[in-house]
Amino acid sequence: MPEQRARTYHRNRVASTFSDEIGRCSKVSCRPRIAESYVTDVVLAPGGKSARVFVAVHGSEAEEESTLEA
């Protein structure tokens, strides 16, 4: 049982780190292509080799598209 708790804890820490780093990159950037945005959720794949990142963007649809491209 402790192995499962450790694995879950590790996955949560990795997801949290992804969220923090992606959020920091979007705030530090002074590029005009990136509108005000924040990470709402990070979901890791079962193997941990990929992740799906959900982002909320404040602005118009054009700003949303350019932010997600960037």
Image (cartoon, helix red, strand yellow):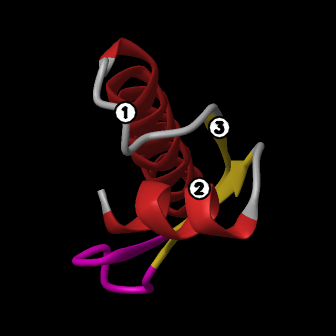
- From this view, report whether residue 14 is shown above or below residue 29: below
Q: Camera-side residue: 27 or 66?
A: 66
- Residue 47 magenta: yes
The C terminus, quarter of image: bottom left
Residue matched to label 2 = 63
Q: Residue at x 42, y 46 (%)?
A: 10
Give the magenta-colored segment's residue range: 45-52
Q: Amino acid at mark 3?
A: Tyr
Question: Which callout, 3 or 1, points at the residue further toward the start of the chain?
Answer: 1
Q: Residue furthest left?
A: 49
Characterize the local packing of mark 2: few (<14), some (14-19) or many (20 or more) Cα atoms within 10 angstroms.
some
Front of the two marks 3 and 1: 1
Q: Residue at x 31, y 18 (%)?
A: 30
- From this view, report whether residue 67 is shown above or below residue 48: above
Left or right of 41? Residue 28 is left
Is residue 61 among the parts visible in the rendering? yes
Question: Which callout, 1 or 2, points at the residue further toward the start of the chain?
Answer: 1
Marks counted in the figure total 3
Front of the two marks 2 and 3: 2
- From this view, report whether residue 40 is shown above or below residue 16: below
Tell me where residue 33 sits by quadrant: top left
Question: Which callout, 2 or 3, points at the residue further toward the start of the chain?
Answer: 3
Residue matched to label 1 = 32
Q: Camera-side residue: 50 or 5?
A: 50
Is residue 42 among the parts visible in the rendering? no
Residue matched to label 3 = 38
- Any mark on residue 45, and which? none
Q: Camera-side residue: 50 or 10?
A: 50
Mark 3–mark 1 Cα distance, whole angstroms, equals: 16 Å
Mark 2–mark 3 Cα distance, whole angstroms, equals: 14 Å
